[in-house]
């Protein structure tokens, strides 16, 4: 099905929601090294849509809508604290220096779910939870450099 892939910088872009999206944007930039690409505001302090980049990757995020304002898409989503701080997916960041990002994430108050360690499959990695409960796996292992099927 590769014929459907658009030739662009990143063809898979996770989308996330945050109750305090402005604070999440600042945290993600400070703790994990994301950079603001675009932030479109809605009413008040609501983020209608934001794009943060990390190297050639990107995430899109926005504020959790107020009850009754959910879109069809929004009604299919839930926040980690609504389901026992679990996730059905997590974002993975491939980094050149896991020690440095581990230190900045820890300094920014990330909850460490798996401390920084050498992985059996190669590289160094850790897993943390951001202030609103989203899970992030961060490490030096590059899956693009391994064997493909």
Image (cartoon, rainbow, N blue to C red):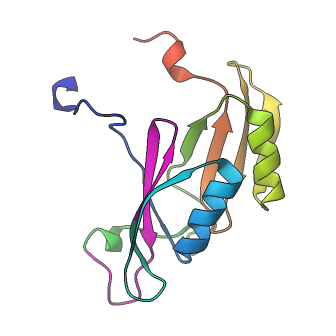
Where residue 85 sits, quadrant-wise, is bottom right
Residue 63 among those drawn in magenta? yes
Q: Residue furthest left?
A: 3
Residue 125 visible? The answer is yes
Q: Residue at x 66, y 49 (%)?
A: 32
Pick the quarter of the image with the C terminus.
top left
Q: Position of residue 57 (x, y in %)?
A: 46, 40
Q: Residue at x 63, y 69 (%)?
A: 132
Q: Position of residue 82 (x, y in %)?
A: 55, 74
Where residue 20 sits, quadrant-wise, is bottom right
Taking the image as shown, residue 149 lies to the left or right of residue 23, namely left
Residue 112 visible? The answer is no
Taking the image as shown, residue 138 lies to the left or right of residue 146, namely right
Q: Position of residue 114 (x, y in %)?
A: 77, 44
Taking the image as shown, residue 114 lies to the left or right of residue 79, namely right
The segment highlighted magenta reads 50-71
Given residues 104 and 149, the one toward you in this image is 104
Given residues 66 and 43, the one toward you in this image is 43
Q: Residue at x 20, y 26 (%)?
A: 1
Question: Up-down: is 44 above or below 136?
Answer: below
Given residues 41 and 21, the one toward you in this image is 41
Labels in figure, total: 0
Residue 143 among those drawn in magenta? no
Taking the image as shown, residue 95 lies to the left or right of residue 120, namely left
């Amino acid at each position: 099905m590769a014929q459907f892939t658009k030739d662009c910088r990143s063809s898979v872009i996770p989308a996330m929601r945050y109750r305090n999206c402005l604070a999440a944007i600042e945290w993600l930039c400070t703790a994990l090294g994301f950079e603001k690409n675009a932030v479109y505001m809605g009413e008040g302090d609501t983020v209608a849509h934001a794009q943060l980049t990390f190297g050639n990757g990107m995430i899109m995020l926005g504020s959790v809508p107020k009850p009754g304002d959910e879109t069809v898409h929004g009604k299919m989503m839930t926040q980690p604290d609504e389901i026992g701080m679990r996730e059905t997916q997590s974002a993975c960041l491939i980094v050149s220096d896991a020690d440095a990002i581990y230190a900045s994430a820890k300094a920014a108050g990330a909850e460490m779910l798996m401390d920084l360690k050498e992985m059996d499959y190669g590289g160094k990695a850790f897993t943390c939870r951001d202030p609103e409960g989203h899970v992030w796996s961060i490490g030096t292992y590059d899956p693009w450099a391994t064997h493909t099927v």
